[in-house]
Image: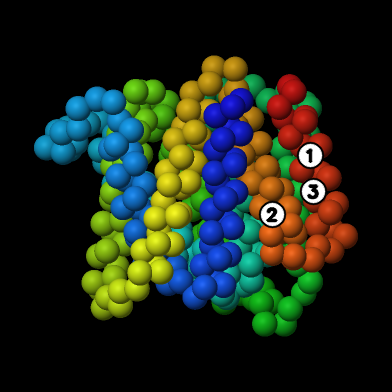
Amino acid sequence: MINLILSISFSSSLYVFFKYFEKYNINTLHAIIVNYVVAASCGFWFFEGNVSFAHIPEKQWFLGAILLGLLFIFIFNIMALTSQKNGLSVASVAGKMSVVVPILFAVIVYKEHLGIFKVFGIIIALLAVYFTSVRPKSSKTSLNKRTLIYPILLFVGSGIIDTFIKYMETNYVSSEEIPYFSAVVFSFAGLIGMVTLVIKKDFAFEWKNVLGGILLGVPNYFSIIYLLKALQNQNLNSSTVFTINNVAIVMISTLLGIVVFNEKLIKKNWFGIGLAIISIILVAST
C-alpha cells in the first residue's frame, strides 16, 4: 500500500507544478520535454543493473516502450485541446473516468474478481470524479458536437495508457527492470517531443522552462515507478490500484487547489470529495 500512497502523492504534486507553470508563464510543451529527459535520466541512474543502449532494442518490452512514449505525448496534447475547447472540468472528468478501461480489461483478460462492494465502490468512484471536477457552467466552454471528439479521445487514450502499463508490467517487465523500462519510455516520449518542436519550428529557449521541466521530471518519474510497483503487489489487484489511484489524485488535487491556490468549491465538489472517501474505503477493504 505504501507504493500506491507514494504514487498518488507524486502524481498529485504534478498538478501543483502545472498550476505554477500557468502563473509564471512557463512554456508547457518545452517544460514537458525537459521533464521527460530528467525522468529518463532518473530511470537510468536508479537502475542497479548494467545499462547497455545497444541492447535496448533486444528487450521484449522495447516496442511497447516506444508506443507508450508516443501515447504520453499524444494524450498530453489532447488534454490541452480538451481544456481549451471544452473546459477544464470536462478534461478532468474525461481523464479520470478512464479508470473503467483498465478495470474492465483486468476483469475480462486476467479474470480478476470484483465483489459486490467493490463494484459499488467503482461506481461511486466514477460519480466522485464527476462531482469533484464539475464547475459552474460557462458559455465559453460549453460542450458541442464539433469538439466532442477531444474528451472522447482523452477518455479512451488515458484508459489505454493505464491498461497498456498494466499489460507490460504483467507480461514483460520484471520488478528489477522497472527503472530501466520507465527510463526508455520517458526517453522516447522526450524524443518524440523534440521532433514535435522541430516540426513546429518552436526553438525559443528560456531557463524558466528548463527549471520547470526539472521540477516536474523527478516526481513524474517516481509517480510511474511506484504505480508499477503497486501493480506488482500480490495483495492488491489492478482494479483496486487504479480506482484508489485515480480517485485519490482527484481528491488530493482538489484539496491542494483550496489550500495552496485558494480555489473555491461549489457544493457538488464537496459532495464529490465525500463520495471519493467512501469509494476508497469500499474498494480498499474488499
Q: Inspect the image, locate mark 3, and give the three-letter code of the amino acid beneath it.
A: Ile
Q: In this figure, which residue is indicated by the disc labeled 1?
A: 277
Foreground mark, 2 or 1, reads 2
Q: Which residue is mark 3?
A: 273
Percent of width and height locating residue 233: 53, 21
Mark 1 Cα-neighbour bin, 10 Å: few <14, some 14–19, many ≥20: some
The residue most toward the right is 267
Q: Which badge, 3 or 2, comes first in the chain's sequence?
A: 2
Q: CA distance from mark 2 to mark 1?
A: 16 Å
Considering depth in this image, is 44 or 135 the residue closer to the camera? 44
In front: 143, or 210? 210
Q: Residue furthest left?
A: 54
Left or right, 272 with reference to 261: right
Q: Secondary structure at mark 2?
A: helix
Q: Could you tell me which residue is drawn at 28 percent across and 37 percent down?
A: 44
Crowding at dot 2, Cα within 10 Å, few <14 / some 14-19 / many 20+, comes out as: some
Q: Amino acid at mark 1?
A: Ile
In the image, residue 127 sits, relative to residue 170, either above or below, namely below
Q: Position of residue 136 (x, y in %)?
A: 79, 71
Q: Which label sits in the foreground, 3 or 2?
A: 2
Q: Which of the two residues, 95 or 190, is positioned nearer the viewer here?
A: 190
Identify residue for label 2: 256
Quarter of the view holding residue 116: top right
Query: Residue visible at 49% across and 23% down?
Result: 232
Q: In which quadrant will I find the C terminus? A: top right
Q: Amino acid type of disc 2?
A: Leu
Q: Total marks drawn?
A: 3
